[in-house]
Image (tube, grey):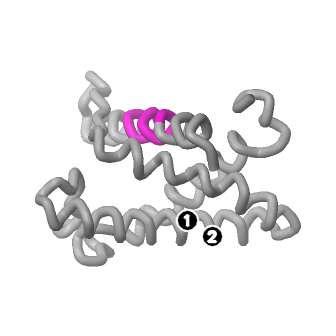
Amino acid sequence: MNWKTFFICGLTGWCMEILFTSLGGLLRGDLLLNGHTSIWMFPIYGLAAVIGPLSVRLRHCPVLLRGCFYGAGIMLVEFISGSILRLFSLCPWDYSKTPYNISGLVRLDYFPVWFTAGLIFEYILSQKKKHILS
């Protein structure tokens, strides 16, 4: 994992979160489509850079298994990073009032989102796209 890859993953994660939160607003009838994120999310999304080397090791596995692996890994990182941020009252999310949450830090019903996000990061970081990161 290098800094350039970390930076690209951080920016990609921010963009995906802004898109996701703006579409959530649309579902609530908000046609302004205001999306949002937090500066704290940049290094967390940047950690997705580890998916690049992992995808090389997992390339022989079916896409369903890879997506499940990435989704579980992302949820673990979300839980750990959220726990650390919460210690300093800096956690930008709180799922405690939603169903299927674990300690208000992870939503199990978001697993399909993280499954998909992991595969998107895999695609971006794949050897076929290596020229983007050079």
Task: Look at the numbered discs 1 and 2 and tell me whether their residues touch, using CB distance below 8 Å.
Answer: yes
Q: What numbered label is drawn on residue 68?
A: 2
Q: Position of residue 2 (x, y in %)?
A: 62, 44
Position of 109 relative to 42 (above/below): below
Q: Mark 1 points at which residue?
A: 71
What is the residue that sits farthest to the left in this orientation? 89
What is the residue that sits farthest to the top in this orientation? 32
* Residue at x-position 41% and y-position 52%: 44
Position of 16 relative to 65 (above/below): above
Q: State the extent of the magenta-drawn residues as a range.
A: 11-19
* Residue at x-position 69% and y-position 40%: 124
Relative side of 90 to 119, left or right: left
Mark 1: few, some, or many residues within 10 Å (few <14, many ≥20)?
many
Q: Where is residue 54 in the image (x, y as percent from the top left)?
A: 71, 62
The type of residue carrying mark 1 is Gly
The rendered magenta stretch, by its main secondary structure, is classed as helix
